[in-house]
Amino acid sequence: MSPAPRTALAGALVPGTTRPVVVGEYPYYRAAPANWAADLRELRALGVDVVSCYLPWRFHETGAQEGERSFDFIGKTDPQRDVVGLLELAAAAGLGVLLKPGPFIHAEVQLGGLPDRLCGPGHTPYQGLDGTVLTSQGKPLPSLLDPAVQAETETWLKAVADEVVAGAAAPDGPVVALQLGNEGTCGDAHLPVDAQDASPAARRAFARWLTGRGLPDEAALATEDVTRWTSATRQQWSRWSGHAIVGLWDRISALFPEGPARLANVPLTAVTAPRAALDAWASRQRAVQGSGYFVGHTEWIGNPARETAAFGSHLAGILLGGTDVVEANWGFTWTDESFARPATPVFNALLALLLGSTTVSVYTACATENWGPLVDMDPDGLRAEGVDPALHAPPYTPGAPLAEGGAHQANAQGLRLLAAFLERHGALLSGSVLDRDAVVLVDRALPEAGAWQRTGRTVLAELADAVHGQLADSGRLIGLGWLDEHPAPAADGTPVPVAVLRAGHPDGDGPGELTLPAGEPADGAAAAFLAAFAAALPAPAGPRRTTAHGAARVLSRSGPDGVRVIGAFNPTDADDRVTGTGTDADDRVTGTGTGTGGGWTLDLPAGSAAVLVTRDGALLGWLATPEEPSGTPVALLWDGEKADATRVRAS
């Protein structure tokens, strides 16, 4: 059965919108309160629709007597704690608000925002089956399944619900959404399966879950050493790892008033991540996608604008997860200075939009410079984890579009460009459907077993690489989905060709089907299967596009009334040229259009991207990533003429 269709996240954040929504992070706890109002007004002017912000527990807690906690959300002890006033300023600026109260927030805040007492010997640590303890600044993070920790976190979250959200909740107030947890519960939704919380409380919860599923024999093994587990127990743990996270989301959601939408964020995972982390992430998708919450993704797996591996990981993760982007780098320059220049974040935003995201994330939208010791990360703890404390010195995200106080930085150009494009053509983008040549449906049992595989490539990782290879080499996009779902049809309602990868013992597979033993190395079988399936597909009936040097990847979307949106992306270090023929520029091929038959050519330098919006073969508008300082510009010839008149530029 397919999951019930859900309203797009954009529509939950901005009811009634017909275009993708821009979400900009504003860490008020790092900004001087005197700058809040001007910063928020300027973010709205730059095109931000919804401002998001974490709430650091350790920052707002002002008293922790035995059995009693006190919090400040109105600035009575420190004006920087006046988050209630911040919400009023956001509303006055015309911004919706996405609040993210954790309890664990990461956000480069000491201990992910948790109070010190939760990360000491008095609480059960978050410890994996492999014995690894999850840490922050060298200190153990607590298991959020420990009843004592849950009681503490519920006190914090209930205070946020009562003192912050209740008076500001949508539809009458600015708080349009709440994020549940962070990147799972505490950055764990992409960990290897044996690094998932296996504290005593987690083991007991796993046993109860197994009992509830009618699996008493497996439940009896749940608290035993993992070396005694059967393959069936391990597969159930793979499934449980998602349910454990969703269960925390449920507990958090129940504490807050109705009105704001509920959102969870799950990190994308690199296809090449060690210890089969991609399969562990995929195993959790059964519970995550069935949770009923809006699910978005964070993008901290490299730079798709400059790394083909990162491009492939984004492609596979968004195709399988079907998620909106809720946290994308617009200014962290720790490992890549290009994130401070607009070409890179615009490239990554356009990729997510072409793959179906209804949001653009700007993290952070403002480079902030004012915070105190409760927020600052412990330098010795950072060094213990191999991190240079200088990376965390002010400003926080130096390349953000806005500087604290309102000055525009280089990335402001990229934000204005996207806002202008979405204002003019966003409705056509939102109304379109991703074009796929075919879809491969994957048996969930494959990643559930593959998550435990420690030698060779898993079936899912090999398949993900093969899908990216097909797009790069042949221009065909093979979609990915799950065997228990029904793949969406093409834009015109016709079904797309389907292939199936099953788990089991091979026994006379039919055309378009392959059965592979679960948990064993793929050894090229998944890649060969995809290649044979793609080769047997009929020749594309629609537009024909070629690349001069094989560097560019082209995605397209189709909508009603002859709308087509074409995205061309060059994640390599070599320039390329994309040429389009057929209905992209000449619908007279089908007797319905107004093109002149000249086709189009797009010069696409290394690290650049462009998106073209057409209707019935006519070019309505296009945009390209801003030119790099030493690079050559993107150039489009449409029907033999320069298309400068229809190019969208930063307003």
Image (cartoon, grey):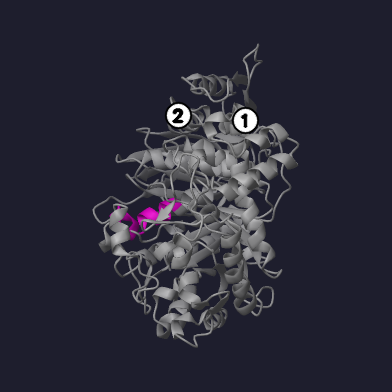
**Residue type indicated by callout 2:** Arg
For residue 535, above or below residue 103: above
Say the numbered circle drawn on residue 115: none
- Going from N to C along the chain, the mark reached first, 2 or 1, is 1
At x 39% / y 38%, what residue is drawn? 309
Q: What residue type is labelled 1?
A: Ala
Name the side, left or right, on which 577 lies relative to 583. Answer: left
Q: Is residue 619 above or below residue 598?
A: below
Element assignment for label 1: helix
Q: Looking at the image, which residue is at 66% across and 49% down?
A: 561
Q: Does the magenta stretch include residue 235?
A: no
Residue 56 visible, this orientation: no
Which is the main secondary structure of the residues drawn in magenta?
helix
Residue position marked by numbered label 1 in the rendering: 445
Asked if marks 2 and 1 touch (Cβ < 8 Å), the reply is no
Mark 2 or mark 1, whichever is nearer to me: 2
Query: Which residue is label 2 attached to?
Result: 454
The N terminus lies in quadrant: top right
In three-dimensional space, the C-alpha distance between marks 2 and 1, rounded to whole angstroms, equals: 17 Å
- Give 478 or 192, whichever is nearer the viewer: 192
Q: In which quarter of the image is residue 514?
A: top right
Residues in magenta, as a range: 333-348
Q: Residue at x 43, y 68 (%)?
A: 651
